[in-house]
Structure formats: structure tokens, C-alpha cells
Image: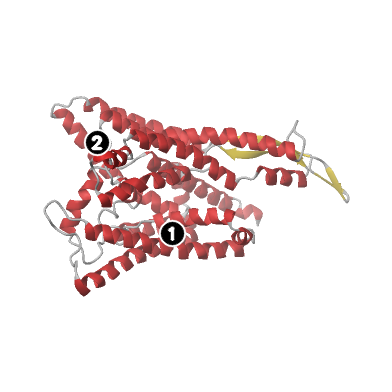
Amino acid sequence: MFKTIRNAWSIPDLRRKILFTLLIIVVFRIGSVIPVPFLDTTALAEAMKLITDNPDSSTNMLAYLNTLSGGAFANATLFAMGITPYINSSIIMQLLCVAIPPLERMAKEGEAGRRKIGTITRYVTVGLGLIQGTAYYFYLKNTVTESGKHITIYNEGFDMWFSAIVIVLVFTAGTALMMWLGEQINKNGIGNGISILLFAGIVAQLPATISTLGQYWNLGSEGQTQFYFLVPFWILIFVGVIWVITFMQDSERRIPIQYAKRVVGRKMYGGQSSHLPIKVALGGVLPIIFASSILSIPGTINLFLQIKDGFWGAFFEAFSTNGWLYMVLYFILIIMFAYFYTTIQYNPVEMANNLKANNGTVPGIRPGAPTAEYIRNILSRITLIGALFLAFIALLPHIYGAATGMGNMAIGGTSIIIIVGVALETVKQLESQMMMRHYKGFLD
């Protein structure tokens, strides 16, 4: 990877793209530390300590958003909503393109259709940013610190309404600006812009993770000697998980394809052997995002209700990240969403028909329905392997935290998958662009 980056840096055009991408990341990080107006930053820091230091309580969703935003959410900054509204908007549009026939036809219209879908996605992103910004404002307004301070400066009268409108609009504008920054990376930089910003936000949390590891190590020197073993063991697990994710990201099942010979005029076409690649991690990190978003709803509701006793108190506690009910449902939902995402992305019947139209066959399998059934069975088995892999990576930090007490790490399994996936994708794009420039003179 480092060799690829070094070689890309030696090419002036790619060097400009890399520098432009780094510039956008710097702008993103600057916006992540500029607080919105009309907030008491001292009271905010006191209230948000619960999110950063105790993500095992009802603050699951807030801690998750804070990680994806690179710490901007806990500080209520310009980019506090992060890129989450755009991710949710993209997921919603993918689902609607399957469920609504007009959108499905629009998506199949080629480049023009994709531009229309992209425009709709932007509008939905701004709408979701407005909704999330409004919800976050009410959370800030209703939160009172242990010392009795209000986070919002104005809490009654015209001043309250004016400050509320300004705060919500600033949050929404930050969402739109981040979406625009991501699109600029797509046009003038390297890699997928949204993924790069997500990657930068998660990497920005690494110092917090290192600081937390240092605190646990200090606890070992204060008498809790088990942390002298647990901290190095956590580092080994972290490195091992990165290796497993890297291996699984590049793993694929190759279905052999044989194309029949056919004569067109005086030329003969076909007669070639190829393969149909199917990645093991078909859905990437999306099944985890779906599952964690749904399971965060009870904790988010309890964030406002603050129920700690009785039946409902035990119910909401079971949905904490280290609760048994959370882990069981998390595992089941990841498996379900992995199969759901595969179903909407891959159509075995259409794949079999395309092969048949191009005189392609799977050796030993008849064209048509038998080929579709064969592909469907392979997809089912591959999806199960990928889903179990995702569930293992996602649950490992929770299980380790529950077993050892080290549950407040800023970097979890989802974050590691995103970091590794974006890094591999960016390196592949660099390699492909270097390959294009290497053969440019030959082709000319």
C-alpha cells in the first residue's frame, strides 16, 4: 500500500489529486471543531462526557454518531450530523429503487437516470439532516447537567425560537456542505468522497482509543494488574481483526463460465473460458449499519425518558451494547439484512438470462432455470459465510468489553471494517489510475 502511494506521488496529476483530497479532509476537520452558536460549551462538555465515557448506557446511538462524525457530534459543531444523513439517504433510495417501479425504471436509464437518482438523494439528505438536526436540538435543550446548567443559552421567548432556528439550520447546512465536499473529492480527488470523509472521521478517533488504552494501563499500575494482560491482548485482537477483514474483503467465489463458439459473417466469436466473481462480503458494512440503527432506537428513546427502574428499566438495559438481548438480536439482524441486501442487489434469474443471451453456460449446468437455481444456491452459501463474518467482527468488541470491562473504546468492529474497506478501495483506485497513465503512450 505504501509503495503504491509513493509511486502515485511521483505522478504530477495524481499528486494534485492526492493533495486536493487532503485539503478537503483538512476543511472537514476544521468544520468538526467549530461549534454552533447559542450553546454553553462548558455545559455541553459536561453533558457529553456521558456519551464519550459511557457508551454502554442509553447513549448507544449518540456514541455511534459521534464515532462516525469524528467527535464532532459530541461537541455540537458545524459537522455534528456528519455524513450519516447521506448514508441513510443512499440506503433509502436503494430500497425505493427496488420497491417503486418508476424509480427502478429511472435507475436503468443509464447516466441520465443515475443523475436524477443522485439529485433526489441530495434532497432526501438535506431533509434527513433537517430532521436529525431538529431532534439533536431538542435533546440539547432538554438536557440539564449535574450542576444544573442548560446547554442552550436561551430557553424561553423569542430568543429561544430564534436560536433554535439558527442552530437547526447550521446543522442542516453542515450536512449539505459535507455532501458537497464528498462530491468534490469524487470529481477532483482520489477515491469515493463520502467514504474518505467517513474514514477521516473514524481515524480522528484513534487518539481517543490510544488515550483510553493508556488509562487502562494506568489502572494496572494502580493495583488492577489484569489490565497488564488485557491491553496487549486487545492490541493483538485489533491487528488480527484487520488481517481477517483484509482477507475477507478480497475473497470471492468464482463461477466458471464457458462461452460457445458462434460464427458471424467470416469471423468466429466465443469459445472462451471466463468466470463470474461473487464476493464473500457482498453487502460490505451495510448489514451492520442497518442492524445497529434499528437496535439503537430503544436506547435513543430511553435517552429522553430516562427510565432506570422496573420492567421497562430492565428492558432498556437489555438493549445496552453489552446486554444479552442486544447481542442476540444484533447477530440475528445482521444475518437477515445480509440476505436482504443480497436479494435486492443480485437477481439469479437475470444473471442466468444474461449468460444465456451471450451464449455463456456454467459447465455441467443447463442454461436457463437450472443455472439460476445453481447461482441462487451459491449466493445463499456465500451470503451465509459473509454474514457470519460480519456478525463475528461486529460482536467481538461487545463480547470482549463485557468480559473484560474495556467497553468504552472509540473504535469498534464496524469502524475497523470501514477503515480497512476504504483504504483497500482507495489503493485500488490509485493502482488503476497509475495503470491508465502507464499505458497511455502505448495506446496513443
- Crowding around mark 2 (Cα neighbors within 10 Å: few <14, some 14 to 19, many 20+) is many
Residue lying furthest right:
266
**Residue 197 image point, x, y percent:** 39, 54
- Residue at figure coordinates x 33%, y 61% from the top left: 133
Say left or right for 263 vs 9: right
Say left or right for 379 vs 233: right
Mark 2 and mark 1 lie on one chain; the one further toward the N terminus is: 1
Q: Real-space Cα distance between discs 2 and 1?
A: 32 Å
- Residue at figure coordinates x 29%, y 51% from the top left: 71
- Residue at figure coordinates x 40%, y 47% from the top left: 293
Name the one closer to the observer, 429 or 155: 155
Return the residue at label 1.
Answer: 182
Q: Looking at the image, do the residues carrying marks 2 and 1 touch, with CB atoms under 8 Å apart?
A: no
SS class of the residue under badge 2?
helix
- Residue 15 visible in the snapshot: no
Return the residue at label 2.
Answer: 213
Name the one closer to the observer, 96 or 32: 96
- Residue 393 visible in the snapshot: yes
